[in-house]
Structures are given as structure tokens and as C-alpha cells.
Image (cartoon, coloured by chain):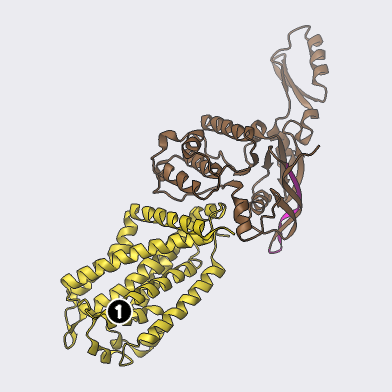
Amino acid sequence: MKSLKVIMRIGLLRGGLELKQFLRQRESVVFTLLFPVILLFIFGSVFKDTIAPGVTFSQYFVAGMIASGLVNTGFQQLAITIPMERDSGALKRLRGTPMSVSSYFIGKALLVTILMVLQTILLLFFGAAMFDLNLPTDPTLWWNFTWLVILGSACSTVLGIAFSVVPKSGRGASAVVSPIVIILQFFSGVFFVFTSLPTWMQQFAAIFPLKWLTQGMRSVFLPENFATQEVAGSWEISKTAIILLIWLIIGLAISIKTFKWSRE
Amino acid sequence: MGTTLAIEVYGLVKKYGDKTAVAGIDLLVNQGEIFALLGPNGAGKTTTVEILEGYRNANAGEIKVLGFNPATKGSAAQSWRNRIGIVLQSASDAADLSVIEMVSHFANYYENPKNVDQVIKDVGLTEKLNAKVHELSGGQRRRLDVALGIIGSPELLFLDEPTTGFDPEARRSFWDLIRTLKQEGTTILLTTHYLDEAQELADRVGVINNGQLIEVATPSTLGGRNNAPAKVMWVENGVSKEILTSNPTEEVIRLNQHFNGQIPELQVLRPNLEEIYLRMIGELK
């Protein structure tokens, strides 16, 4: 049995290499890291309406964008780059070395974690500085925020790896993955107030994690009494945790079962 | 005589759906030799090699590579991968990393890696040490692939069409590198389209066609090349003449007497490996 230490050490090295590669690709830095920030500026500047007493749409939107950020850095990024790595022969080459699969996944998880932290900080910063986002003072809310980020990004990572078998080729991956993310964002209450969406759209969105993540983020950043404006009349915190956990397990199972090293 | 075998394959069969790609191949490769696999595209060459490398599973057959069944999963397979090196046909990854970054990163994967600088020097990329992969030419990229394949000090090296896209000079220096590896005791399984490459490097060659290994021999005896009829050509009264004979010496002596001395524009041609090979796979009558 290869020692856990070796697997971890190589996983860390892979994480470093992944980050180095990521930062050297300017388009991926802009697309993955800065795109949500750009969207924040556009939507935050255009929609300044008040949607409830003391709550502006831009505040609502920032909460949604922080949730979306987890989907961007995890799901979207991995579901696009893994098929590209498969096409380029990178994965096949790795498969031929003694490197353990676990190290590869650790490297990916590290990359996602770093990007996610960077992006969340960027969004929190600009949200608070320019769009009246109220950073919570209650420690309970920060605790909720922390597990939402951890669970949400774990979910997003494994689902990204699981989904990486869907695109037929690396070149087409972006065309397959991006629309799914954008549609989910529309349906899950990122670009519009969730309760203003048609019921079928709400019900459809409730199957997927993003809706629950956005709602969870609102519970952290919007006033407590805004909960009455949600579909269920409450923040549904425990239900959110359970649904994210279920998706995490599903994603993990599919990733392990279906991961492909090369295009056969 | 206890020659140890690096690769031992009996009755290898691989099917894709109802199409048989490999139809029962027996293959024995000695430790320390360079064995070249030749064969047209779609003959089953790549499938065979990929089964030996552990990328694909066979439908039938007994396979041992360094005494290990490549289809085995888990940590035993990882220790086995520590002893082999694979240079795949095409990889276009890691465009934004530098040569030294790639090679030293891959060195981490192995228990007994070679010296990074030395390997880069051996493949002739010292001047490109800090160049990004996307700045390399096709031939330089290929040499990086080789560097990544040998960094782990493999006992057995798989080379899949290693010199495609090389200029003649790069090929020569690549061949020297392969000979050095052989001297160090590395067993090499080479697939190639270049017959002169097989001729230069291989101790033995095997020809695969239609999923079968149709012959295994040394490059100079493949297809009865050593006994094959030779072509004797000359010019008589301004007209080119030629004759195919299994005894060219006798023919030359006869011509020598006929011309009473110098034979005009005399040439004696043995079939080259390429002609023999093309005849074997049915491309040349």
C-alpha cells in the first residue's frame, strides 16, 4: 500500500502545478475568477431597486453571485478543463506513471479551494464596498457561511469531475457546460428574485444544489426578517445542508465510477 | 541459458464489439533488448502495446510485463508503473509549463528518479530548460516526452513512434540516446513507421498485420531478406538491363567475362527492409 504521506505530498505538488498552469493562462483567470466580479458590477449598477424594506436587489444579487462563484470555480472549471486534459493526452500520460488517482483529485481540489477563496474574497470585498452588502456580525452566521462554502465547493468539485465525462471533446466542453451553468443561475435566483420566477422554474431549480446555496448565502447576508420573503417562509438551513450532502455523495460516487483517463 | 523475459505474452486477443483487433498474439521480449514492432495503421500494433502498458484490458491471453499482469489494479500496479516508462504517441498538454518544471515535477512521482538536469541534457533540451512547452518545436516536444518517460529510471521503456516529426539530425541524436539507454540495461519496446529506424536500433523486429504477429526476426533476416533474390543492374549498348538472381556473385562474374572487364554502371541491390516489409503486409507484389 502506497503510504498516505506520499499520496498527500504528490497531491500538494500537483495542486501547486495546477495553480501555476491556471495563473499562466490569462483567459482562464479572467473567465473563471473575474467574470463573476464583472457581472456583479453590471447587475449591481443596473438594478438598484429595493425588493423589500431595507433590502436592495444588488444585495440580493451579491449573495447569489457568491453562491455562483462556487459553481464557477468548481463545477464549470473542472467540467471544461478535465475533458481538455483528456484530449491533450495529459491524463493518459499521468495514468502511465506511479502517481495515484487520489493525488490527482487532491491537486484539483486544492486548485478549486484556492480559486474559490480568492473569488469569494473578491466578491465580498466589492459587494461590501460598492453594493451595500452587510457583512454579518453574528458568529452563527459566519459559521453557516463557512460550512456553506465548504460543502458547496466540495459538491461543486465532485460534480465537475463527474460531469467531465459528458463533453465529447475538450473543444466542445465549454459549449456544453457553460449554458447549463447560466440556465441554473437564471433558474436558481441569482439574476432574478427567486420568488418572482414561475413555479415550475422554482421547482426545477430546487432539484439542484445552486438554488439551495443561493438561499443559504442570502440567509447569511440579508436581514433575518427577509426569510419571510422566501418560498418556504424560512431559510431552510438544515434542509439545505441535507440536499448539498446528498449531491456530494452522488457526485463522489459518479466520479469514482465513471472517471475516464482517455478518450476511447 | 537463462535469458530473463521482460515481456511474455501468450494468446493475446482483443475485440472491439465484433471486430477483432488482436487475434491471438504470442510475443516474447528479452530483458535488455530493443524490440521493434512494425505494422500498418490499424494492424493491432497500438492496441497490443496499450494492453502491455495497462491502458486496455485484453479479452483473452496470458500477459506478463516485468512478471506482472498489467490489468491488475491498485497499489501493486503503482509499484509496477514505477518500473516502466511510457512515451505515448501524442501529447499536447502543459503548454504553459517550462521544460524543467515538467521534468522535475514528474521526477517526484518515482521512487528512484534520474537526475533531472542529466535527463534534460541527455534528450538535448538543456538550451530549452526554461522554455515553455508551447515554445518548443515538434521534435523538441517529442524529446520532452521522452525525458518524462525515462525520468523514473525505467527497466522497460515503451516508445510509440518516437521520432515522428524529427529532422534527420535530431533522429540521429535520438537514436544515440536510445542506444545509451540500452547500454544501461533498459529493455525497449519500440513501435515505428520508419523501417530505417528499426534497422538502426532493433535487435529484433516483429511484424503485425491483421491482428497477428506474422514474423519475428532480426532486421537483417526478416522475411528471408538475407536469402532473397538480389537485383543486378547494368547498361549494355546504352540500354538499362536488370536481372533478378539468388546468386548475384555468379551473375557478376558472368557479366565480367561477357564485357571482358569493367561492367558499365554495375549495381547489385539486395531488397531493403522496407521492400521486404511492404511485401509481407501485402502492399507490394
Amino acid under disc 1: Met
Q: Is residue B99 left or right of residue B79?
A: left
Q: Is A97 colored magenta in this rendering?
A: no
Quarter occupied by residue A190: bottom left
* Residue wearing tag 1: A217
> The numbered mark 1 sits on a residue in which chain?
A
Q: Secondary structure at mark 1?
A: helix
Q: What chain is the yellow one? A: A
Residue that appears at 76% across and 39% down: B3
Q: Position of residue A178 (x, y in %)?
A: 38, 68
Quarter occupied by residue A196: bottom left
In magenta, the rendered stretch is B17-29
Quarter of the C terminus of chain B within the rendering: top right
Pick whichever, B229 or B259, lies toward us. B229
Q: Position of residue B35 (x, y in %)?
A: 69, 39
- Colour of chain B in the rendered structure image: brown
